Image (cartoon, rainbow, N blue to C red):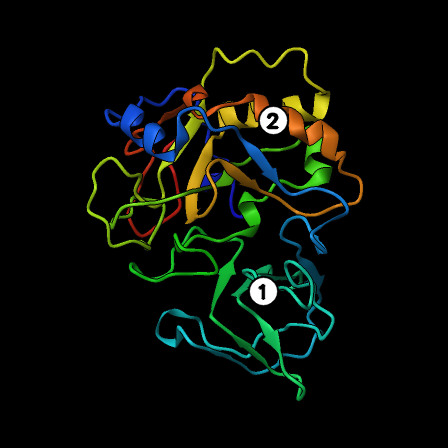
Amino acid sequence: MFPEDNYWHADVSGLPVHPRSDDYIASIGWDRYVHADFGSGLWEGSTIGIPWTEVDGDQPTVPISFYYEDESDPGPYPIPPNAPIQGGPDSDGDRHVIVVETGSCTLYEVYDAWPQPNGSWEAGSGAVWDLSSNAFRPAGWTSSNAAGTPLLPGLVQYDEVANDTLDHAIHVTVPATQKSYVWPATHWASYSTNPNLPPMGLWLRLRADFDTSGYSPQVQVIMEAMKKHGVIVTDNGSPWFLSGVPDERWDNDMLRQLRDIKGHDFEALDVSSLMVSPDSGQVNQ
């Protein structure tokens, strides 16, 4: 899931706090709690989280059209007809579709995806990523999320939590962002010039003094990952919502323990020392 020296795997536990940290956190929600936007079962008839699927090199490619065509990687994409859609086939939400072609180690991500009777797809935007590369897509381009970053590497997955191998930053949504983005984002999604709002791509870290003892082992894994790898603002949405993959093995009551974390338990980071190049996800580590 990208090279070891990619930003998704970076250790940010020793990075300095951003000078506007308190302003950013106050605008997101100082006393609002963290919410696991993933789990088991259904919520209002939809699965909870963002699913994904694997295909091999024999999967046929199909045509796909985008209404953000100028910022999308053109098709065809190897999307199977039964590819899982975020929220289910009748969802009126973001409707992400994520496919990994294992043979070529290529990630295909689609936003607002709608299958058509002839086997093609219509969608809002699409992005293709080489999972063995640190290369970015063009500056100013969106992706399947508002920050222009890939979705899959920032999702919390059951197996990596259960096996204590959660080794990456996590997507987090915030209510409002400013008309700006910072590395590793490549796209903004706001017209506000309010400097107290976080820019897209802002990196935050759970404070080192947050006591994780007393929580279930799996919740501790997520908490400790937020201390070491942090969370990255990649979309507008509800405050402090963490993105993950639906799985029937999740214990939703256990995941609610994350609500003990409030906004003021985070600190925004200055990650400029990590960046090797504005056009690359490689980090100085």
According to the picture, the residue beneath numbered tag 2 turns out to be 258
User: In percent of the image, x 75 and y 37: which residue is there?
Assistant: 250
Establish if 31 lies above or below 180.
above
Q: Residue at x 70, y 26 (%)?
A: 218
Amino acid type of the residue tagged 2 in the rendering: Leu
Residue lying at the far front of the rendered structure:
44
> What numbered label is drawn on residue 176?
none
Total numbered labels placed on residues in the image: 2
Residue 28 against residue 63 in the figure, above or below: above
Q: Earlier in the sequence, mark 2 or mark 1?
A: 1
Q: Where is 90 relative to 250, above or below?
A: below
Q: Which residue is mark 1?
A: 92
- Which of 42 and 40 lies nearest the eye of the viewer? 42
Res. 71 in view: yes
Q: Nearer the viewer, residue 7 or 238?
A: 238
Please rate how many residues cluster around mark 1, counting C-alpha atoms within 10 Å: few if below 14, some from 14 to 19, many from 20: few
User: The C terminus appears in which quarter of the rendering?
Assistant: top left
Q: Tell me how far mark 2 sits from mark 1, CA to CA.
A: 27 Å
Based on the displayed image, in which of its 4 quarters is residue 159 positioned? top right
Q: Secondary structure at mark 2?
A: helix
- Choose top left, top right, bottom left or bottom right for residue 118: bottom right
